[in-house]
Amino acid sequence: MAERAAIALGSNLGAREALLARARDAIAALPLTRVLAGSAVAETAPLGPVPQGPYLNQMLLVETTLEPRALLEALLAIERANGRVRGERWGPRTLDCDIVLYGGRTVNEPGLTIPHAELPNRDFWLRELAELHVPVPDP
């Protein structure tokens, strides 16, 4: 059965707008997945202790029959294909693709937490979800 998932995109290195566009296209091309809507792209200040430039962010609402782990693996492959190198935590990145919500599911596995653990701390995600009319679960 298809589930709706909210996927956060972010970029603060390179051609940020082009990277977000490539991510949107790659997600739309995933098997058993279709993009239903996207929030406006917004520029936000970086979070965390590492000095870096501002991010461009966007939230996508997708419908998918991929299980959460399979969706995560596909998103990680999209990140790698767009130059993402995992280095310093909270550091700058060409592309970040995070599963924020997946239907009404709660997942707590190594490397995968749904709802995303940082959801309550990221006002821009909350605004983007509201723009897409996606209800946010209580923490």
Image (cartoon, rainbow, N blue to C red):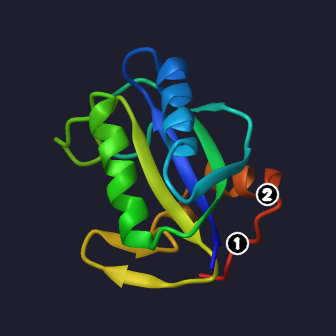
Identify the element where label 2 is drawn: helix
Percent coordinates x, y for residue 80 in the rendering: 27, 37
Q: Earlier in the sequence, mark 1 or mark 2?
A: 2
Furthest toward the left, the residue is 87
Residue at 64 percent of width and 52 percent of height: 34
Residue at 20 percent of width and 43 percent of height: 86
Residue 52 picture quarter = top left
Percent coordinates x, y for residue 131 in the rendering: 81, 51
Q: Mark 2 belongs to which amino acid?
A: Ala
Q: Marks 2 and 1: in contact by CB < 8 Å?
A: yes
Q: Tag 1: Cα neighbours inside 10 Å, few (<14), some, or many (≥20)?
A: some
Q: Mark 1 belongs to which amino acid?
A: Val
Q: In this view, does 94 lie above or below 99?
A: above
Residue where numbered disc 1 is placed? 136
Quadrant housing the C terminus: bottom right
Identify the element where label 1 is drawn: loop
Q: Distance between the residues labelled 1 and 2?
A: 8 Å
Residue at 66 percent of width and 82 percent of height: 138
Residue where numbered disc 2 is placed? 130
Q: Is residue 17 visible?
A: yes
Q: Is residue 92 visible?
A: no
Q: Is residue 36 above or below residue 86?
A: below
Furthest toward the front, the residue is 31
Residue in the foreground of this view, choosing between 28 and 56: 28
Q: Tag 2: Cα neighbours inside 10 Å, few (<14), some, or many (≥20)?
A: few
Quadrant housing the N terminus: bottom right
Answer with left or right where residue 91 lies relative to residue 13. Answer: left
Q: In this view, does 9 lie above or below 122?
A: above
Percent coordinates x, y for residue 6 in the rendering: 61, 59
Residue at 64 percent of width and 73 percent of height: 2
